Image (cartoon, rainbow, N blue to C red):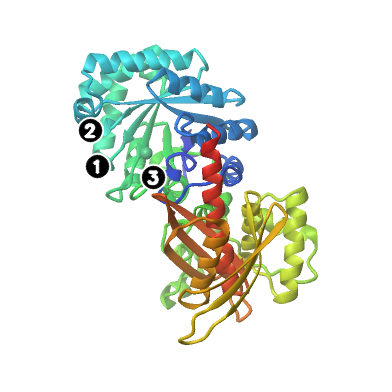
């Protein structure tokens, strides 16, 4: 790295807004707050926490993130409508650094088919909306949706008008993931050259990954002068996802000589944050994923290993510790104390305090009695279970199944709700897990269709814990559930109940409005 004083690129994280739109990735409030906390520690400049008008859950999430964000900017999304902007502000007002993000489609295809507005009307609507938002706070972002397919002259016209109305960031979204790096360079270059007041705003990009080019397109924009990149952890998002935060950040850092730009990201927090988002959303990271994939730093080929031993820089352009890969999979055991547990949890990206730490520690002791060595994976599972427990309505108590080849399983299941225990007995299903699912449906009165069922072991060895992930459908929506136990039938029951609890939470949230 030769550049000693690179310009700073603003990292705008939209994991909680655009990322959450990944199918099956919806998160509850405690999960969103846990991720927001991790993003703050990661050092992102802006957290887009939701789209306040779309649901009470989004409103609440923006409001609660605003309370904990401190110096990190918190952003809420709004269409160019008065009610949207007012609602966004109502959610953001507690933030020390609030930002309202208004968007309006500008491309011909959207103008004609979606909005049925002509160009003059689009400009008028954008200006009115930016003004209204700027009446609430000084930090206003305007996005001409589908900008990469908008006529350049018109894009310049809208941008100039939005800046005059008070926009301080102009974000160029490649909404459908259609652009090439050259397109992005051309658009950013043209805006910088042709928009008279462009120096009063930061240019930003928001790239989707439909052709696998979100990161390349974002970097091309930075090279052309963009000062903000919108991205998500692990690149999650609708369809093929968004620009991946960790890839953009490490590209800028590793090739500072080329980009002449850097970020404020605390890069050793990348892997812990990636793991947290993967376990909360259930969207696992592929092994060969750049930067945070399990194999990203694994040098297996003999010739590489030989080179690595002699001199690391022969094959390594980044050090694993720079992105937060721990050097060893540290093992905790029966005699490890609270402090060691808290330490290890922090290193893994979690914040345990008070009652949460007490509960995890108690569970840790129970597990340490069952299996001698507690690996990072075990600890993550314990913590996740604890976080999930916050929203638990139905709690697993016990089960008993009798079955065998060719026999109909008989199951006895006990769960509790609000401290009250309930049991059911039934015969049916294909095998013990199916039987337990039927019993859970009966006892909770919730019918679902199981779409996916996965079991994998959290760590190694015969006494390893099994983690079960289920995806179920209820009234047209998909819900996830996770459960962990050294007994995989129990883990299945816990995962299924966890999904049922999410359904109950959504039903309750919707009744509030
Ligand atoms: Zn998007």
Residue corresponding to mark 2: 149
For the point 51% across and 66% down, the residue is 437
> CA–CA distance between discs 1 and 2?
8 Å
Q: Position of residue 57 (x, y in %)?
A: 53, 37
Whole-Å distance between the Cαs marked 1 and 3?
A: 13 Å
Ligand 1's quadrant: top left
In terms of depth relative to the viewer, which is nearer, 95 or 344? 95
The residue singled out by tag 1 in the image is 178
Q: Is residue 484 visible?
A: yes
- Give whichever of 413, 72 is nearer the camera: 413
Mark 3 Cα-neighbour bin, 10 Å: few <14, some 14–19, many ≥20: many
In-front residue for pair 450/57 = 450
Q: Position of residue 22 (x, y in %)?
A: 41, 48
Disc 2 residue crowd, few under 14, some 14–19, many 20+, Cα 10 Å: many
Q: Tell me whether circle 1 and circle 2 mark residues in contact (CB < 8 Å).
A: yes
Residue identified by numbered label 3:
243
Q: Earlier in the sequence, mark 1 or mark 2?
A: 2
Answer yes or no: is residue 319 visible.
no
């Amino acid at each position: 790295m030769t550049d000693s004083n690179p310009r700073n690129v603003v990292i705008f994280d939209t994991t909680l807004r655009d990322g959450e739109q990944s199918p099956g990735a919806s998160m509850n409030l405690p999960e969103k707050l846990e991720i927001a906390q991790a993003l703050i520690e990661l050092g992102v400049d802006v957290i887009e926490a939701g789209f306040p008008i779309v649901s009470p859950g989004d409103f609440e999430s923006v409001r609660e993130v605003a309370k904990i964000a401190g110096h990190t900017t918190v952003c809420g999304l709004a269409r160019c409508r008065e009610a949207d902007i007012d609602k966004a502000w109502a959610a953001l007002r507690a933030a020390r650094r609030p930002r309202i993000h208004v968007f309006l489609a500008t491309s011909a295809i959207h103008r004609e088919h979606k909005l049925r507005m002509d160009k003059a009307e689009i400009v008028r609507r954008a200006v009115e909306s930016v003004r209204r938002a700027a009446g609430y706070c000084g930090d206003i972002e305007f996005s001409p949706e589908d900008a990469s397919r908008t006529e350049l002259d018109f894009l310049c016209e809208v941008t100039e008008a939005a800046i005059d109305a008070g926009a301080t960031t102009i974000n160029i979204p490649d909404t459908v993931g259609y652009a090439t790096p050259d397109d992005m360079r051309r658009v950013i270059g043209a805006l910088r050259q042709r928009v008279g007041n462009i120096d009063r705003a930061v240019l930003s990009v928001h790239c989707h990954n439909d052709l696998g080019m979100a990161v390349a397109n974002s970097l091309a924009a930075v090279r052309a002068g963009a000062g903000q990149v919108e991205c998500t952890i692990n690149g999650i998002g609708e369809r093929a996802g968004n620009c991946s935060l960790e890839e953009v950040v490490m590209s800028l850092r590793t090739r500072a000589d080329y980009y002449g730009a850097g970020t404020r990201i605390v890069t050793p927090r990348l892997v812990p944050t990636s793991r947290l988002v993967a376990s909360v959303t259930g969207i696992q990271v592929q092994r060969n994923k750049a930067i945070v994939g399990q194999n990203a730093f694994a040098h297996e080929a003999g010739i590489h290993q030989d080179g690595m031993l002699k001199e690391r820089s022969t094959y390594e352009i980044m050090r694993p510790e720079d992105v937060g890969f721990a050097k060893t999979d540290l093992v905790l055991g029966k005699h490890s104390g609270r402090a060691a547990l808290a330490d290890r949890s922090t290193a893994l990206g979690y914040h345990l305090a008070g009652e949460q730490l007490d509960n995890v520690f108690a569970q840790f002791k129970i597990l340490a009695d069952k299996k001698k060595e507690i690996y990072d994976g075990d600890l993550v599972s314990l913590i996740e279970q604890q976080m999930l427990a916050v929203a638990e309505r139905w709690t697993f108590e016990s089960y008993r199944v009798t079955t065998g080849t060719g026999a109909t399983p008989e199951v006895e299941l006990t769960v509790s709700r609000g401290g009250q225990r309930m049991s059911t007995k039934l015969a049916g299903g294909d095998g013990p897990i199916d039987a337990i699912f039927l019993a859970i449906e009966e006892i909770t009165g919730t019918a679902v269709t199981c779409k996916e069922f996965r079991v994998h072991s959290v760590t190694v060895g015969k006494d390893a814990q099994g983690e079960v992930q289920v995806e179920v459908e209820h009234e047209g929506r998909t819900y996830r559930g996770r459960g962990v136990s050294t007994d995989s039938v129990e883990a299945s029951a816990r995962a299924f109940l966890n999904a049922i609890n999410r359904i109950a939470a959504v039903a309750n949230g919707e009744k509030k409005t």
